[in-house]
Image (spheres, grey):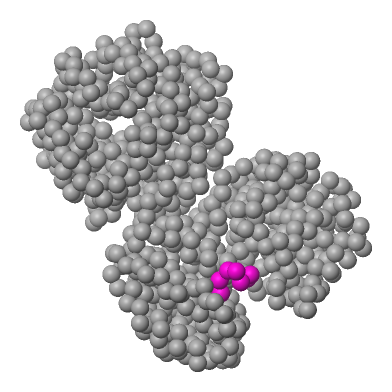
Amino acid sequence: MKTISNKSKIIFLSTFPPTQCGIATYTQDTIKGITDVYGKSITCEICELVNKPKEKPTQAYTLNTKKREEYARVAEEINKDNAVKLVHIQHEFGLFEGNYGDHLLDFLNAIKKPVTFTFHSVIPNPNNELRTFVKLLLSYSNSVFVMTNQSKKILINDYEIQQSIITCVPHGTHIVIYETPAQAKEKYGFQDRLVLSTFGLLGEGKNIETGLQALSKIIKKESNVLYLIIGKTHPNLIIDGVDAYRNKLESIVEDLNLKDNVQFINEYLDTNELLDYLKATDIYLFTSKDPNQAVSGTFSYAMSCACPMVASKIPHTREVLTPDCGFLVDIGNADQFAEATLKLISDENLRREMGISAFRKTRASSWENVAITHINTYKKLIENPAEIKFSYPPIQLKHIKKLTTDLGIIQFSKISVPDITSGYTLDDNARALIAFCMHYKLTKDKDDLPYILIYLDFIERCQKPKGDFINYVDQENREHIEQNAEVNLEDSNARAIWALGTVVSNADILPETISKKATKCLLNSLKWAENIQSPRSIGFATKGLYLYHTAVPNLYVAAIINKLNAKLLSNYEIHASSDWKWFENYMTYGNGILPESMLYAYLTTNKPIYKKVALDSLDFLMSKMFIDKNFKVISNNGWLHKDSTEANEYGEQPIDVAYTIQTLNSFYNAFGTLEYKSKMKIAFNWFLGKNHLNQIMYNPISGGGYDGLEKQNVNLNQGAESTICYLTARLLMENFKLSEYKVIPLTKNRNGIAINS
């Protein structure tokens, strides 16, 4: 049952659900990751591996591995589809028939498409026959994925495989919204128990016996422990309806008098339910007894749900489980399992710290990031790789709403948990007001209106009698005069004007009470605004004043725009040179607002000098951020100085990406230059994973934006600034996505300049 599609296709040769096995689930999750990140331009289909004929095939292709003639026949069938660009074989010894599964060679001899493998097992110290066979397999593809560095080393050293053809990609994990076990336990009524867990398709290899033996020792000191054994027995082990392994475990529970401390969850749970159980787990016991097990999905999933770990020493756990995430113990050693578990039980802070370390460590291995690694490798193997493009994720408001109280939006977040002790700022509430106005304009979702009012009320209460604003309010709704005096308030005050202008510019769709309140606040701020000195503050204020002026033409406001930008122009004339066309001797954050301010001054006054400086400075800024079609954020590690011989690296923040997109959007609307639209897409791809770590910069479940991109890691805290910056950028790209399907009429502003309405 082939699907009809114009997209490029990847065919996965694998088992697949409803078959219950680890490789089937792994393939399903890999495909979902690829589809979520690249589904706009690529589709994944299954060549399902079965060991008996299927009456009603459910996948594009079916390969009965027991019939040798099927291997070549299916390959020839795949060859006929011109849309198929690659075949990805999920390889495990035992999946294919023959000596070491060598019937697969019949498929490889017939297939005409590029091929790659994922090796789910890499056996160390192979005999000559196995080594020769593995080398023969890879001669058909010159590409293989493995999931640990240890497996990579074995391929290189024991199989003599070239390092250049090996892609190491960690076992994927599901992104979850972080919560403490205490919060997650409420769903299951486990609030009063300390929860241990193990999950997976049960069998001798899981070695649950060791966990039960350790539990008998643990409850002598901690009787309140509950051990969850989650998962069905592997279907291949249930013979004539008899589940011998589970019967054995139940006998051990009876013999050791553990009935009050063990709960079997004999189900093959869907992913979300499984993740909820793992989030409710205080300590995860990984009891596997296979010393050569290359990788474990259950181990990875538990770490990704912030479980502190006690784990058997297998190659995967030795490589991944660092001391800040848990304890490694000898295989089958119940005493060591009990001792390590009791140490964690006795120290709640240690459990929390280890859980958070495990959570942070596994974000890089989310299925979305695994998908990016896969596609980057695929592009080296297929024709026309440029056809594969990022898809835009759904717009999510969960996290920004979670950060918002009746008073306003909370400043910081510890991972995804709002940190109420960080208080509230004018800066963030102004940003949030702009974002929700954009969202309301796009969707007309009336649920946005209460949030718009919350942020607007916060700005109003921060305004002082002379029209300027305080910036900081603490969690108890008190103004901290000393902090408000210490911080440079021009930027936050000017952002408030930008937000107020945004509200007024949407007066035709917003309730009158909201637009009137914003108008009153903005007009009260004009006397203060006249005297702004800071370049970026001039830019923020100009944007707000321009938005107000286009909605409610006002000569006084136009005069302020001209006055402010005359100062900014003076800055440019002082600092600019033939090779440094900028307003200062350095570039810091939010640089795009400066040429954008010049643009609004031009659109307001029609003075050619403003247009020239706007375009020259934008071109100069873009030359520093777009190099060889790649986008690079100016680092906050020392910024970019006029006399620098090379730019600093890393320390990249979402605010700079969002401002770049906003600036390009404004210039595109003013001049219709397609290059600006193209650069917007390139810049937004930074959020989607086109950065030096090849990792997404947002939480796809909640819409939270990650706080920064460092040299070796993503800062997973999801504060107000980064979350709002991601949201505003995503909303702008949504407008462009919609515009690709309809013609947007050009209108003229009051000076006769063509702009997009």
Picture coordinates of residue 116, whole percent (x, y): 44, 76
Q: Is residue 45 above or below residue 364?
A: below
Picture coordinates of residue 486, whole percent (x, y): 42, 18
Picture coordinates of residue 752, whole percent (x, y): 9, 30
Q: Let me know if residue 418 appears in the view.
A: yes
Picture coordinates of residue 699, whole percent (x, y): 48, 46
Q: Quadrant of residue 495?
A: top left
Front residue of this view, candidates 305 and 709: 305
Q: Let me know if residue 89 appears in the view.
A: no
From the viewer's perspective, tell me whether residue 605 is left or right of residue 381. Answer: left
Residue 151 counted in the magenta span: no
Residue 16 counted in the magenta span: yes
Front residue of this view, candidates 632 and 39: 39
The span picked out in magenta is 13-21
Q: Is residue 130 above or below residue 91?
A: below
Residue at 82% across, 55% down: 262
Q: Quadrant of residue 593?
A: top left
